[in-house]
Image (cartoon, rainbow, N blue to C red):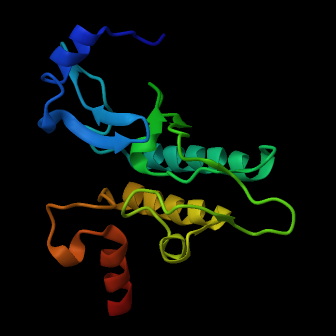
Amino acid sequence: MAHTFNYQQLAKATKNFSKESLIGQGGFGAVYKGKLKSTDLAPDQKPLDWITRMTIAAGAAKGLEYLHTEANPPVIYRVLKSSNILLDKGFNPKLSDFGLAKFGPSGDKSYVSTKIMGTHGYCAPEHLISGKLTMKSDIYSFGVVLLELITGRKALDDSRAREERFFVDWVILRLHAI
């Protein structure tokens, strides 16, 4: 059963919505981590075991597959990133924040032309270059999420050296070294 919190409880739990409690920015506003008594309101405080990580990946993939192949019309999610994958008590994933989602291309079109939007580190390079949004844009983002789940690193980490801030760039450098 879901808990409902009032504004005062949320303000107290997030240290009055302080910067140190801010964990991300979503399409509907800021996302904060908070504590109410000894219970975290946000997940991801201890490393997840391998089976849990793969359960999350498989569930997110199923959600994305549904949007691409079963929804009518198909939906390009557009903001697939770790912070938009919510977990229940059993670590079953649910995709959230459909504020930037677009209906997929119809007829003989292979893409939707749109303003470039998305989160740095997750956005497909071809979308950034051309503004063309395809189902493959979501697949790229899923690949970044999958790499995060496998390695435990963030897609964008400003605390790292410049050449290591964007996780995908770091991975590409490592692959070229092999």
Residue 43 place in picture, x, y as percent: 33, 33
| Residue 15, above or below 104 | above
Q: Can residue 178 be seen in this view?
A: no
Quadrant holding the C terminus: bottom left
Count how many numbered circles sit on residues in the image: 0
Residue ranking furthest to the right = 107
Q: Which of 87 and 81 is in front in this view?
A: 81
Q: Which residue lies at the image location 39% right of the left edge and 41% below the top edge?
A: 26
Q: Which residue lies at the image location 66% right of the left edge and 62% below the top edge?
A: 135
Residue 149 place in picture, x, y as percent: 40, 54
Q: Can residue 22 be seen in this view?
A: yes
| Residue 56, above or below 125 | above
Q: Which of 15 and 114 is in front in this view?
A: 114
Residue 113 place in picture, x, y as percent: 64, 65
Q: Which residue lies at the image location 47% right of the left edge and 46% below the top edge?
A: 51
Residue ranking furthest to the bottom = 177
Q: Which residue lies at the image location 33% right of the left edge and 10% below the top edge?
A: 5
Horizontal side of 6 relative to 15 (left or right) equals: right
Q: Which of 33 and 87 is in front in this view?
A: 33
Horizontal side of 71 relative to 53 (left or right) equals: right
When asked about the image quadrant of residue 139, the answer is bottom right
Horizontal side of 96 relative to 36 (left or right) equals: right
